[in-house]
Image (spheres, rainbow, N blue to C red):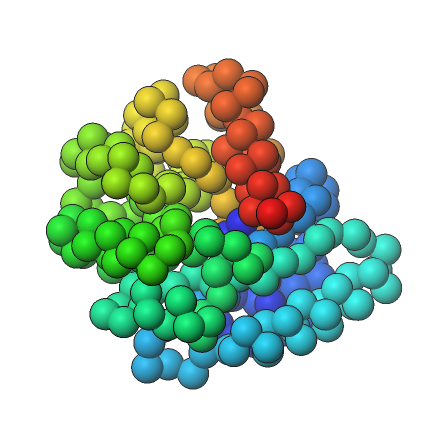
Amino acid sequence: MHIHILPGIDDGSQNLETSIQMLRIAAKSGITDMIVTPHYKNGRHNASPATIELLIDKVTAAMRREGLDIGLYPGNEVFYYDGAAEDIAAGRINSLNGTDRVLVEFLPGERYIYIRNAVDAIIGVGYVPIIAHVERYECVIERPELVHELRVLGAEIQINSGSVAGNLGSKIKHFVMELLQDEDVDYIGTDAHDDKKRVPDMKKCVATLRKICDEEYIKMITCDNALSIIEA
């Protein structure tokens, strides 16, 4: 539910060949469905919802020619800005698969009050913000209880599979372990960007999860919660 696999529209896959290779990696990892989330940044040249749908059709056709079968669904990863909530409500930005869920990100050094106000603004127009890769935000790393506070306010929390696996170092891994033990995570996504370094592979993440979480919770945050968006 967080991946940059559509070719040529952000800093993710740069061509169709890379997208197909990413899909091969995902299939081997057991991934069956993806909500694609190209970046949306105010003031930049962003792909429209219609363009995203056309690219999904293009990638799906190419994928099927290769004998792959992964469901692709539209979304965006919104870099929050003043006015983002209104643009989401107006349909200028994709929610996740047309539901009331919106994937939203911030600067790593953003103040907590700004993130909290963004959550309030998005909820105020009838959507549920999913905070992307919460482990990147300095304001909550030292105070994990603030992540719980965001969930109490109505936000949902996403972390990256690579962070669980330790790709961002021990400090970040310790932080996400604490969130997982407190069950303050709602989704794990790959946030994959390519077929070499940031790949759509969940195997190492799931192996780590099985050391600290029960199977029901693992299934919820790696599969069921995202499927509920797809099947809504």
- Return the residue nearer the eye: 48 or 173: 48
Left-right relation of 145 to 59: left
Percent x, y for residue 226? 55, 42
- Inspect this view and state whether residue 206 appears: no
- Return the residue nearer the eye: 118 or 43: 118
Percent x, y for residue 187? 47, 39
- Return the residue nearer the eye: 167 or 49: 49
Give me the residue at 56% from left, 19% from top: 215
Give me the residue at 39% from left, 33% from top: 185
Left-right relation of 57 to 160: right
- Inspect this view and state whether residue 123 appears: yes
Q: Quadrant of residue 44?
A: bottom left
Give me the residue at 58% from left, 41% from top: 228
Percent x, y for residue 194? 56, 60
Q: With respect to residue 92, does 141 lie above or below?
A: above
Left-right relation of 150 to 184: left
How many marks on residues?
A: 0
Give me the residue at 59% from left, 36% from top: 223
Percent x, y for residue 49? 54, 73
